[in-house]
Image (cartoon, grey):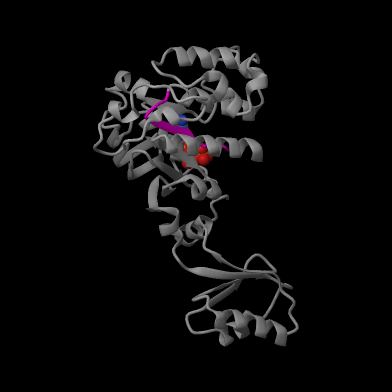
Amino acid sequence: MGKAISGAPGTAAPAPGPRLDSMASPQGSALELDGLVKRYGRTVAVDGLSLRAARGAVTALLGPNGAGKTTTIEICEGFRRADAGTVRVLGLDPVADARALKPRVGVMPQSGGVPGTARAGEFLRLVASFHTRPLDPGALLDRLGLAAHARTPFRRLSGGQQQRLSLAVAVVGRPELVFLDEPTTGLDPQARHATWELVEGLRAAGVSIVLTTHHMEEAERLADHVVIVDHGRVVAEGSPAELTGAERQLRFRARPGLGLEELLAALPPGSAAKESPAGHYLVEGEVSPELLATVTAWCASHGVMTEDLRIERRTLEDVFLELTGRELRS
Ligand SMILES: Nc1ncnc2c1ncn2[C@@H]1O[C@H](COP(=O)(O)OP(=O)(O)OP(=O)(O)O)[C@@H](O)[C@H]1O
């Protein structure tokens, strides 16, 4: 705490004004969920989910399609009611205290949120006018690559442009907390980077951000705290570094069908080796100079030419696969 919002993205010159933390209670989490349950008929979308999102941090809910991320976020936004459990958003109840929360919380839904006929620039200025100390709408459009589309009605914007306008609408009021539901899904790399930079700027200005994603790169790049969700439950959480651990792994590509049992016999005890998919090899264990030398010597003695030999950290994708036996992107 203690950071002024005046450095928030989209503002050319920091305006003197109230500090962000003057509006927020310094104690407590931005978001607290305990034992959240939500059913749609027989489908249990959220199944006893508990989490804390710290103030001033980026918290990412990472999980595959159907994991319950959107349902969870919509409950936090006050759009849906949980069947069981408790939700505190900035210490308040998202339904009972909706009026008090509205000016303090920015919401970017997965789709829409803007009337189809509204022109991008006019709508953003209108939303800005509801807030006491908004960001400059023109600068925000520019920052998100939408300046040339300020006069375009929402329904005539491309999907990616609509998404970026929804993001602008969510943050223009300088909220204390922003919910972003899959903010970069479907965006091209340039728009994705512009979105990431905006999120990083918000965080630097002390804004609390809770986002959902099924892109592990997004979670790894942006999040201070990652909550991995599957089947409506938290399966693991921590910082990206905590989740992926210190271990390294060795990967290489070579012709398919190498005799891995023979390679394994040459490796130090406790090592593992697998081929998945065909021609892609992974060696796990304590990656030491000796292990590297053993693998390359074994390859040389078997006439195996390796490509892309590299030593790398585990990714969140690997963590998810280990925890659930499935791929995040499936
Ligand atoms: N309005 C609804 N009515 C019935 N079932 C729903 C509804 N909304 C979501 N579900 C179901 O609840 C489960 C969780 O969906 P949810 O959209 O919350 O997951 P998600 O993790 O956000 O997935 P995605 O990444 O695809 O958006 C899924 O099985 C989904 O089919």
Q: Position of residue 291 (x, y in %)?
A: 56, 81
Question: In the figure, 322 relative to 70: above or below?
Answer: below
**Residue 281 at least partly seen:** no
Examine the image and state in which quarter residue 185 appears.
top right
Which residue: 46% across, 60% down?
Answer: 244
Which residue: 28% across, 22% down?
Answer: 97
Q: Position of residue 72 (x, y in %)?
A: 39, 37
Total numbered circles: 0
Q: Left or right: where does residue 132 sit relative to residue 250?
A: left
Q: Position of residue 203 (x, y in %)?
A: 43, 38
Q: What is the span of residues highlighted in magenta in the rendered image?
A: 174-185
Q: Left or right: where does residue 294 sit relative to residue 95?
A: right
Examine the image and state in which quarter residue 89 appears.
top left
Examine the image and state in which quarter residue 30 appears.
top left
Q: Left or right: where does residue 117 sit relative to residue 67?
A: right
Residues 255 and 307: in front is: 307
**Residue 68 at least partly seen:** yes
Q: Position of residue 167 (x, y in %)?
A: 52, 28
Question: In the figure, 108 relative to 294: above or below?
Answer: above
Residues 146 and 238: in front is: 146
Residues 310 and 271: in front is: 310
Which residue: 44% across, 44% down?
Answer: 60
Taking the magenta stretch, the answer to whether it contains residue 245 is no
Which residue: 34% across, 28% down?
Answer: 20
Question: In the figure, 123 relative to 68: above or below?
Answer: above
Q: Which quarter shows the N terminus?
A: top left
